């Protein structure tokens, strides 16, 4: 990245001096941290409420509940996800996940939320906002999953809509994107119900269960969301 310092006449081609900033990443990190604090984010207090559910960050105390729901849904989730690490269902793997999530949270480039059912206080799924880009893109991607036993009740659509509205408002995004495997009709239905529109097909989009698979690309803009009837 280059910053322009303009001299008389504000003509960078004629009078300007180009300042190469070697440590711009440090500067950007400082700015994002200040923005993070100014927006009032705090890992253990960030919470989004929907009509039926609570979304919050993953805590160290969630270890047993997280491993339980992930192990229960392993056979269901693995065909739709990259191959899990060998220790993904261990205490060590869980701790590393929390550390990584907190680190990404502090850098303001990823926000992960566990989905909690308030009546049972059980963890029933997860949704993430990642690949967050600032100006001029001001975009991000979302990914999500929910316990197979409670699918079909509209929970995932409720969560996606709530998180997208939060991201547009609090992160000042202009667009949110998602990708689904071509045969994942349930996920496509969730996105369509949440105001997303199909934008094309990406060949070999990413590694899923050991194979690089094609994905249908989806997107929703701030304007789309504002005019979407839930």
Image: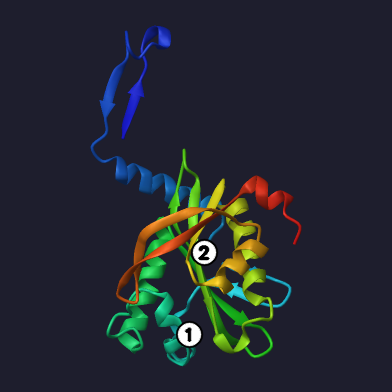
The residue lying at 41 percent from left, 68 percent from top is 102
Cα distance between the residues tagged 2 and 1: 18 Å
**In the foreground, 80 or 94:** 80
Where residue 225 appears, x then y in whole percent? 67, 52
* Residue 173 visible to an observer of this rendering: no
Where residue 112 appears, x then y in whole percent? 48, 68
Q: Which mark is residue 62?
A: 1
Left or right for 40, reference 22: right
* Residue 73 visible to an observer of this rendering: yes
- Mark 2 or 1, closer to the camera: 1
Instruction: State whether residue 162 is above or below residue 96.
Output: above
Q: Circle 2 — which element? A: loop
Mark 2 highlights which residue? 42
Numbered label tally = 2
Which quadrant of the figure has residue 215?
Answer: bottom left
The quarter in which the C terminus is drawn is: bottom right
């Amino acid at each position: 990245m280059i910053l322009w310092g303009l001299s008389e006449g504000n003509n960078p081609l004629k009078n300007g001096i180009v300042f190469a900033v070697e440590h711009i990443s440090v500067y950007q990190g400082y700015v994002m941290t200040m923005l993070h604090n100014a927006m009032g984010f705090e890992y253990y207090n960030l919470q989004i409420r929907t009509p039926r559910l609570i979304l919050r960050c993953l805590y160290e105390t969630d270890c047993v509940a997280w491993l339980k729901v992930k192990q229960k849904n392993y056979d269901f989730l693995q065909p739709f996800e990259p191959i899990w690490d060998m220790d993904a269902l261990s205490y060590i793997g869980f701790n590393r996940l929390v550390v990584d999530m907190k680190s990404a949270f502090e850098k303001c480039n990823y926000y992960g939320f566990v989905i909690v059912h308030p009546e049972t206080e059980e963890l029933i799924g997860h949704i993430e906002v990642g690949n967050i880009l600032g100006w001029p893109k001001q975009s991000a991607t979302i990914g999500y999953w929910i316990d197979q036993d409670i699918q079909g009740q509209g929970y995932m659509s409720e969560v996606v809509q709530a998180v997208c509205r939060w991201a547009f408002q609090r992160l000042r995004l202009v667009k949110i994107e998602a990708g689904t495997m071509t045969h994942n009709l349930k996920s496509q239905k969730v996105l369509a119900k949440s105001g997303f529109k199909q934008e094309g097909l990406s060949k070999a989009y990413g590694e899923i269960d050991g194979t690089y698979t094609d994905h249908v690309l989806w997107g929703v803009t701030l304007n789309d969301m504002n005019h979407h009837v839930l």
